[in-house]
Amino acid sequence: MTYAAITGWGACMPPAVLTNADLATFLDTSDDWIISRTGMKERRVSHVPAIELSTVAAARALACANLPADDVDLIIYGSCSYDEAVPNCASGVQLNLGATHAASMDVNTACTSFLYGLITATAMIRTGVVKNAVVIGVELITHYMDWSDRNVAVLFGDGAAAVVLQASEKESGVIGSIIGCNAEARPSLRVRGIGCGYAGRGITLGDTIWDFDGQVIFKRAVKAMSGASARVMQECGVTAGQIDLVVPHQANLRIIESVAKYAGIPMERVMLTVQKYGNMSAATVPVALVEALETGRVKPGSLLLMTGFGGGLTWASLLVRWGDRVTPLGATDRALPPCTKTALEMVNEIRAKQDPHGRSAAGLMSAEFTEKQPAG
């Protein structure tokens, strides 16, 4: 049987840090308020496009696997904050890497995009469609955030990470997965103002209205992630005691704690990055995985539980058996250009283009249209 082993990994985090104290300079909030509700202390703001973040992350993953870009068969770009929709962003990464033989596709299931992409690439390798793949999770949310809305502005940040999958005869990589979608609740997490449904209504990128029902999302996230995790462990004949590390979506510390509790896994075996990066949507799981490897929390043969929840409302839980190697085979000198502004300076530049409610004049004129958009 053919498996899809994870042989390379790499992250690319923007250097500019946006603290809770920074947010308190323009929002009615405080460090204590944010930490007590989310567990977040900092998040990152990117000074470059998402494709550039992804290129650096992918280049580091390829170097880690010692796989030349020209040998890549497939690039999957998981995100919900595209630099552009046509052409797709995966093709931009392909061009930057020089991966001339790689098929390229984007996957958007919001915060679960990386997990869905990982499952997709695994299936394509196991069925012989491709022999190796690069799977990316990336977000550049700060550039279309409604910075007047405290409910969402304190939560999200930018970042990227990537993994390399290669065909293997040894049991490793994704060994079980459960995915799904609770579409009846999709209006509880929606960014209005981006997409063809708003075309011709005077809305431009950045003129967004966020629908974010925290109570609904919390309850459904805990239920879906816990249920999917229990199912995938049961189907694979695995108990909670056999899970070496949980690598969850970092949406909120309380959600993570609740999911771990229901799974019967102590927090000492849960990888946390939410405190320093916030919610990076599709990037949270791969960034946490890379940091787990870099800090020695993944050992040869480790059994990992990856779980996530996002807009749609989509959910996924995966069991991943790690291979023999936990150290990179190589490195790359590819890096981001220097950042000359602070995170707060970049956010204030975005805010200056928005009205006090997070929308431009054009966005305000179209508010009646957006308010009447159907739920389904």
Image (cartoon, rainbow, N blue to C red):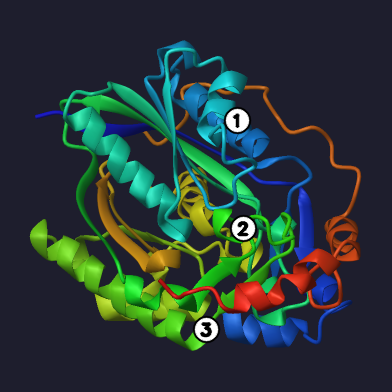
Q: How many neighbours does mark 2 have within 10 angstroms: few (below 14), some (14-19), or many (20 or more)? A: some
Whether residue 102 is situated above or below residue 314 in the rendered picture: above
Which residue is drawn at the image coordinates 62% and 49% (left, top)? 159
Which residue is drawn at the image coordinates 56% and 31% (left, top)? 87
Q: Which residue is mark 2?
A: 194
Which residue is drawn at the image coordinates 18% and 61% (left, top)? 232
Tag 2, which secondary structure? Answer: loop
Instruction: Measure the alpha-carbon separation of dots 2 and 1.
Output: 24 Å
Name which of mark 2 and mark 1 comes first in the sequence: 1
Q: Which residue of the protein is positioned furthest toward the front in this rendering? A: 200
Query: Split into 4 quadrants, where in the image is the N terminus?
Result: top left
Name which of mark 2 and mark 3 comes first in the sequence: 2
Name which of mark 1 and mark 3 comes first in the sequence: 1
Indicate which label's residue lies in the foreground, 2 or 3: 2
Please report contact status of discs 1 and 3: CB closer than 8 Å, yes or no: no
Indicate which label's residue lies in the foreground, 1 or 3: 3
Instruction: Measure the alpha-carbon separation of dots 2 and 3.
Output: 21 Å
Q: Which mark is residue 195?
A: none
Q: Amino acid at mark 1?
A: Thr
Q: How many neighbours does mark 1 have within 10 angstroms: few (below 14), some (14-19), or many (20 or more)? A: many
Say whether residue 40 is visible.
no
Q: Which residue is mark 3?
A: 214
Q: Which mark is residue 55?
A: 1
Pinpoint residue 158: horizontal percent, then vertical percent.
65, 53
Q: How many neighbours does mark 3 have within 10 angstroms: few (below 14), some (14-19), or many (20 or more)? A: few
Q: Amino acid at mark 2?
A: Ile
